[in-house]
Structures are given as structure tokens and as C-alpha cells.
């Protein structure tokens, strides 16, 4: 049995509960597993957000792997492209990325000639960021791929729930 077809809905037998995907990791097990109770987890928003995040990131990573762009790199490229001259500190604060991690991300993007850091203060400690022409080109491709990913997510959730969830999570 193919790995992708080895799925069961662990909550499908519980009336009124939405089924959660269960991926059977034991290739030798051919029968469906009994429903597994989630107990208190069933009332924890964080648990379901994390499950959704795993699916979303997995799909996003697979979608952008052909252009070798990670979710964090995509975020940096998008925000930098929309805000020419943004400082590293402003970008880190906007995306919630630790400065040290952002520096490593920017080094990788610079090595690929996608981003430039230009000194914007007299002492050279502040850098303004901008995309190179290669960065703008790659970002256009990345946005098109990301739009396909977002369309799959909207199809999975339904358009109305997708819009409601997006609006609710913007509040955070």
C-alpha cells in the first residue's frame, strides 16, 4: 500500500467531530486503527493551530522547493520587496525573527544575489535592504507558487472559513 494512501480518520467515528488525518507509520499494519480519544486536546486551540501549521508549512515547502525558497526566506523577500530601504531591525521586528537569525537569512539571500544590504547610517551600523533584479524576478515566481499553495489551502478549508480564519489570525 502506498504511503500516501495509508490514511485513516481517527475521529471519523465520533459523531459531530471533524475527522483529523492519521498517517499510519507502520507499513505492515493493514487494518484501520480504532478511534483515538484526544481528551483535553480536543478543546485546545493551540493543538489544532499546530496541526494546521504542520500541514500548511509542509505544503508550502513542497510548493517552493523547486526555486529553493524557505518560508522564512519568502517572508523576507516579500516584505523587503514591498518596503525598499527597510532596515534589518525593522524587518526583524515586523516578521518576529531574532536579529541573529535574520542576519544568517540575509547572508544566504545575498550569496544568491537576491538581496542587497546598503549602509544607511554614517557609522555603517544601519543597513537599508533592497531586492536585486534577480531577487525581484525570483520573488515574482515565488508569489505565483505561493498563490497556488494558498488556493489549495482555501479549497481545503472552504473560501468562507479561509477568509474568516485569516481575519481572525490577523488580530494576533
Image (cartoon, rainbow, N blue to C red):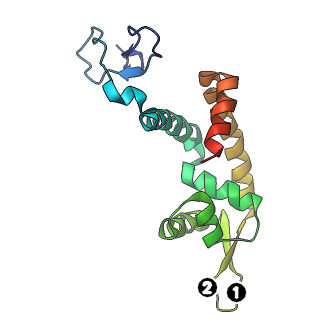
Q: What residue do we see at 63% from left, 65% from top?
A: 91
> In the image, is 99 to the left or to the right of 120?
left
Tell me, for residue 52, which label it has, or none.
none
Q: Identify the residue at horizontal 54%, vertical 43% (top origin).
A: 65
Q: Mark 1 = which residue?
A: 121
Residue 159: percent from the left, percent from the top?
A: 69, 24
Q: Is residue 4 above or below residue 62?
A: above
Choose between 120 and 166: the one closer to the eye. Answer: 166
**Vertical position of residue 85 compared to residue 15: above or below:** below
- Tell me if 34 is positioned left or right of 92 in this view: left
Residue at the spot of label 2: 125
- The location of residue 106, given as percent across then percent down, is 57, 66
Contact between marks 2 and 1 (CB within 8 A): the answer is: yes
Question: Is any part of residue 134 visible from this angle?
Answer: no
Q: Nearer the viewer, residue 117 or 43?
A: 43
Total residue callouts: 2
Badge 1 element: loop
Secondary structure under the numbered disc 2 in the rendered image: loop
Is the residue marked by circle 2 packed among few (<14), some (14-19), or many (20+) residues within 10 Å? few
Amino acid at each position: 500500500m502506498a504511503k500516501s494512501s495509508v490514511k485513516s480518520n481517527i475521529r471519523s467515528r465520533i459523531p459531530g467531530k471533524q475527522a483529523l488525518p492519521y498517517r499510519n507509520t507502520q507499513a505492515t499494519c493493514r487494518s484501520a486503527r480504532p478511534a483515538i480519544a484526544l481528551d483535553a486536546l480536543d478543546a485546545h486551540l493551540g493543538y489544532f493551530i499546530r496541526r494546521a501549521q504542520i500541514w500548511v508549512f509542509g505544503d508550502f515547502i513542497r510548493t517552493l522547493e523547486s526555486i529553493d525558497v524557505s518560508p522564512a526566506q519568502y517572508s523576507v523577500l516579500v516584505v523587503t520587496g514591498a518596503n525598499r530601504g527597510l532596515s534589518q531591525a525593522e524587518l526583524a521586528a515586523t516578521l518576529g525573527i531574532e536579529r541573529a537569525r535574520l542576519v544568517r537569512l540575509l547572508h544566504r539571500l545575498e550569496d544568491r544575489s537576491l538581496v542587497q544590504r546598503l549602509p544607511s547610517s554614517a557609522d555603517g551600523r544601519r543597513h537599508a535592504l533592497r531586492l536585486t533584479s534577480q531577487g525581484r524576478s525570483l520573488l515574482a515566481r515565488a508569489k505565483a507558487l505561493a498563490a497556488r499553495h494558498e488556493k489549495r489551502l482555501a479549497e481545503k478549508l472552504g473560501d468562507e472559513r479561509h477568509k474568516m480564519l485569516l481575519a481572525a489570525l490577523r488580530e494576533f
